[in-house]
Image (tube, grey):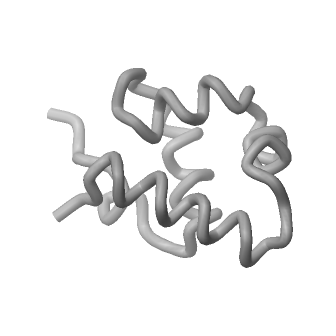
Amino acid sequence: MAMSPKERKAAFRAAATMHEVTMANAARRLGVSYNHLMLVLNGDRKGSSGLKSRIADFLGRAAPEVFEQER
C-alpha cells in the first residue's frame, strides 16, 4: 500500500534532514519548485512519473511504496 499524503510529507522532511538539506533545496535537487513539490506530496497535483521516481529515490524507496499506481 502506498503512503498517505501526510506520510509522504513526513518521510520527505525526514529524508531532507538526513541529507542535510532544506526542503526547498531538496526540491531544487529534484528539478522542481518547493510549491510544486508540496502539491505533489499532498496529492493536489499529479506530478510526472519521472518526478515521482526521483522523490521515491530521495526517500530510498520504490515508487509504488510512495505513490498509488495510476490506472
- Position of residue 17 relative to residue 71, above or below, is below
- Position of residue 64 relative to residue 49, above or below, is below
| 63 displayed left or right of 27 | left
| 45 displayed left or right of 48 | left
Q: Position of residue 44 (x, y in %)?
A: 37, 23
- Position of residue 32 relative to residue 12, above or below, is above
Q: Nearer the viewer, residue 69 or 28?
A: 28
Q: Position of residue 4 (x, y in %)?
A: 26, 52
Q: Position of residue 39 (x, y in %)?
A: 49, 27
Q: Write the residue at 73% across / 49% down.
A: 23
Q: Nearer the viewer, residue 12 or 51?
A: 12
| 67 displayed left or right of 24 | left
> Which image quadrant for residue 2?
bottom left
| Total numbered labels placed on residues in the image | 0
Q: Write the residue at 39% across / 25% down.
A: 46
- Position of residue 56 relative to residue 17, above or below, is above
Q: Which quadrant, please, contains the C terminus?
A: top left
Q: Which quadrant, please, contains the N terminus?
A: bottom left
Q: Position of residue 40 (x, y in %)?
A: 47, 32
> Which image quadrant for residue 42?
top left
Q: Write the residue at 77% across / 35% down.
A: 31
